[in-house]
Amino acid sequence: MEMSRFDEANARRGVASTFRRRGVAATLPSKDGNASVTLAREHCPTCSEDNHVPADEQNEFAQPAMSRILQLAGAVSLFAIVIGGGVWFYIRSLKRAEAPAQMVFKCLFSVVLGAGTFLFDRHLIKMLQGDMLGDFVPAALMVGSVAISGIILSIMWAPQFGNFLCNPITNLMDGGNEEPEPKPYYSIARSLRMKGKFLEAVVEIRKQLARFPYDFEGVVLLAGIQAEDLQDLPGAEITLNHFCDRPDAPTKQVAAAMNHLADWQLKLAQDADSARAALEKIVMRFPDTELSLQAAQRIAHLDGAEKNLLAAHDRQPMAMPEGVKNIGLLESSDHLRPAEIDPAKLAADYVKHLAQHPLDTEVREKLAIVYADHYQRLDLATGELEQLIEEPNQRSKRVAHWLNLLADLQIRHGADYDTVRGTLEKIVERFPDLAVAEMARTRLGRLKIELKGHKETPDVKLGVYEQNIGLKYGSPRRL
């Protein structure tokens, strides 16, 4: 059976390769028998025809090599990941260990013991291959060495392995081995203050502040003892100013400290000017914020607070007029009612007050109510309330309150349904995710009923009925 051209070429290449490796020239018969191919050219690879490898065979040889390279890269990557994870776990465990030196010793001893056991077993395997002591003795020694090494390692690492399994459960109960966050403790100072040992309490507070120099709780406690117990208001002011003058002092803590100082200035010294100065520091340091609005509100009412404090300390005797005798026999008691304050005078006082303190939201709200109810000027009331509503940095709860108040005034003074609805919808638009929006939606649902309830009922003129009809005789009997 004749060989195919491809099989013949493969055979010729195989023979040529054999002779080339032996360095011998060879002659192979050609297919037609008339010519021969001399393999002496194998000594010149560049001129040899058989030295040429087809492209398909080159790809066949290249693919296994590329596969081996990829396998090697994957193995190296996996080895690096395993080694990196082991090193990370070891360093993490070493940091959490109660005795790091002991753990390092255990690790080194385990490595040495494992390496020694491996070398000893390898030597025993060679003995088994050489049949030096038979099969039983080396096998028994191998099992014994592995067992002894395992027992030693299990005894040595049993506490760590037990902690690894049980710590997730025990940590839920006792908090684990993590150290608590360091913080100052003022229980001793408070106890000494309650006993009247104020100087000792100050010493204890200063000990804690030496470790935590900018702890707000300790600063306020120290200033409170200085102001209220030691009657050293200037010392308390120095303590608070030292805390507040730091550029990185928290905003809310600074405002709270200045409010504390203002309270002490009013309560202990009845000094409204010093209290005003403390509050003005908040306005100057945090302008256009909610804190500055609150401070401005307090400043606007300092005069009234000072008068109340002075009146509490300097009470004047009050002459009580003689009461009305036989009040039950009087035809009318209207003249005994206290005189009502004139709304016009109230409005004038409110306008004058707002000229000095334009950020006083309480007085502006009262002025809007006077405009609407007394003067019947819903437009002026709307202007005052809108000024409050559009004021930046106001709390959402306060803005919703003013919008609801505006809706109340609109309902009381005859505004139509669309106007009131637009006012309430502003609450939903501004605060869609807050509780005030849900309350506004509920009110919108019953707005028509609310408007209907405020409409004036027309007067019905009743007829003239006969008096004492029940005292007459001979009235017709109903069947």
Image (cartoon, helix red, strand yellow):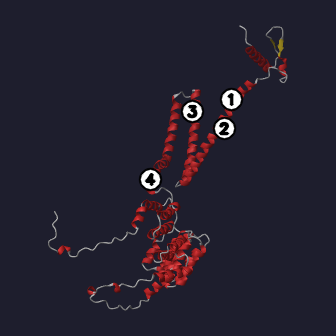
Q: Earlier in the sequence, mark 1 or mark 2?
A: 1
Q: Which residue is mark 4?
A: 170
Q: Position of residue 240 (x, y in %)?
A: 55, 77
Amino acid at pointer 4: Thr
Q: Residue at x 83, y 11 (%)?
A: 36
Q: Which residue is mark 1?
A: 64
Q: CA distance from mark 3 to mark 1?
A: 38 Å
Comparing 4 with 190, the one in front is 4
Q: Position of residue 327 (x, y in %)?
A: 28, 86
- Which numbered disc covers residue 124? 3
**Residue 64 sits above or below residue 400 on the image:** above
The residue tagged with tag 4: helix, strand or loop? helix
Q: CA distance from mark 4 to mark 1?
A: 54 Å
Q: Which residue is mark 2?
A: 73
Q: Residue at x 56, y 41 (%)?
A: 114
The residue tagged with tag 2: helix, strand or loop? helix
